[in-house]
Amino acid sequence: MKMTFRWYGPKDPVTIDKIRQIPVIDSIVSAVYDVPVGELWSDASILGIKNAAESVGLTFEVVESVPVHEDIKLGLKTRDKYIANYTTNLERLAAHGVKCVCYNFMPVFDWLRSELKSGLADGSNALAYDEETVLKMNPAESELSLPGWDESYTRDQLKGLLKQYENVDEEKLFDNLRYFLEAVIPVAERVGIDMAIHPDDPPWGIFGLPRIITDKEHLKRFLNLYPARNNGVTFCTGSFGASADNDLLEMIGVAEGRIHFAHLRNIKIDAYRRFHETGHPSKEGSLDMLAIVRALLKSGFDGYVRPDHGRMIWGETGRPGYGLYDRALGAMYLYGLFEAEGAVSK
Ligand code: DNO
C-alpha cells in the first residue's frame, strides 16, 4: 500500500510543503489543470508536477484525473481524435514515472452534492447530498456552482450537451466505454499504467443522464468489457457507499485483483438518497472502515490509497472537501489501519 494525497497544483492553498509534513505520504495525486479537457498535456507541465513532488521528497505516481472528453462518452465521430490525445497523454505520463491513472465516465457532471457546508454536531461542516434538493435544480437554467460543475461551459453549451445526451442511454454509454477501453487499455498496458475508473458519485443517474459505474452488477459488467488486469477500478467507498444497497465488502471481492487505487472515506446515510460526509473513522459514519481495509487486503490489494473528502475543521476554509486538516487526520487513521494489518513496510 502506498499512501497518497491529492494536490491541486501550485494554486492549491494546501501547499506541497504542508503535505510533506503528514508523515505517512509517499506520493501526491495530481493532474495538469491548465489545458482544456481532451487536449495534449505538455511534457513541461507533467515535469513541473514531478519536480515539485520530488523537491520535497515525495513522488508523483498517480494522476487524478485524465478527464475523458464528452465526445468519447457521447460516441461522436470526433472521438478518435480525443482518444489519440488520451493515449499520447498516457505515454507522456508513463515516461515521467506515473503508474496509475484515475478517470471517470460520468456524462457532463462529475461528483455532485447539494450542500457544501452542512453543519455537523461537532461544529465542523462537510459536504452533503439530498436528492429532494437536487431534483429541484435545473442545471441548464440555473446559476449554480457546485463541485462537479464544469465552470467552463456556457449556459448554451450546457444545454446543447444535455440535449445530445438525450440519445444516450446506459447501453449506449457502455458501448462507448467499451470503444474507449479497447483503444486505451492496450496502450496503458504497454507503457505500464494501471487504469482505474472512478465510480459515479452519487451512484445513480442524475438530471436524466445515465450513470453506469454504480453497483455490483454494473461493476462486473465493466470489468468484463475488457478483462485485463490493468483495466481496473478506483474503489471509492464514499461513492459506492452512498447507496445502502451496495455491499462494499462483496464489491471488493468482485473487483479482486483489479483495484489499483482506493479512495477511503466515510459517509453517513441519513435517509434514502440523502447522506452527508463525515470524518474518516468508522464510528463517524455508515461504513466500517476496518472491514473495508481487511477486505481490500484479502483481495490482494497492494495499490495506492488516499484519504478522500475531509470536513472543514478548526476554522479552515478552502476548496470544498479538500482542506488540509481533516484529510491529514484521515491519512493518519487509514495508515494506522493498514499498519495494524501488517500492510505497510517499515
Ligand atoms: C471528487 C473526486 C472526483 C474524482 C473524479 C475522478 O472529489 O473523487 O472528482 O476525482 O471523478 O475522475
Image: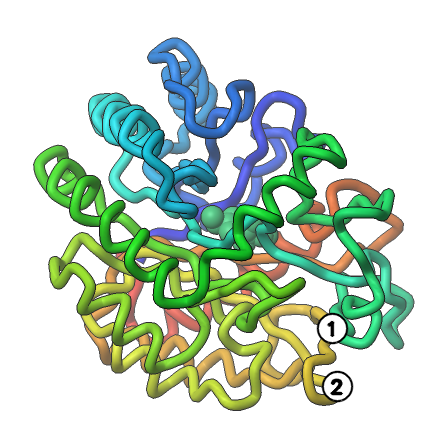
Residue wearing tag 1: 276
> Disc 1, ligand 1: is the CB inside 8 Å?
no
Please tell me in which quadrant of the rendered image residue 309 appears: bottom right
Can you name the residue that lies furthest to the top here?
44
Q: Residue at x 49, y 54 (%)?
A: 106
Q: Amino acid at mark 1?
A: His
Quarter where residue 160 is shown: top right
Please report the residue visible at 43 percent of the width from the left and 15 percent of the height from the top.
45
- Could you tell me if residue 323 is visible in this image? yes
Q: Which residue is mark 2?
A: 270
Q: Secondary structure at mark 1?
A: strand
Residue found 51% across the figure and 19% down from its top = 35
Q: Which of the two labelled residues, at mark 2 and mark 1, occupies the earlier sequence position?
A: 2
Query: What amino acid does circle 2 point to?
Result: Asp
Q: Quadrant of the N terminus?
A: bottom left
> Residue 105: x and y, percent?
43, 52
Q: Residue 273's x, y, as percent?
A: 68, 81
Is 312 on the left-hand or right-hand side of 341?
Answer: right
Q: Which mark is residue 329?
A: none
Asked whether the residues under the numbered discs 2 and 1 touch, taking CB atoms below 8 Å apart as contact, a structural biologist would say yes
Rendered residue at 84%/67% (across/down): 136
Q: Could you tell whether 330 is left or right of 341 in the image? A: right
Check the image and report above or below for 15 versus 201: above
In this view, 51 is above or below 300: above
Where residue 88 appears, x then y in whole percent?
A: 25, 23
Are there few (<14), some (14-19), or many (20+) residues within 10 Å of tag 1? Answer: many
Disc 2 and disc 1: Cα gap in Å? 7 Å
Spot occupied by residue 76 in the image (x, y as percentages of width and height): 37, 39
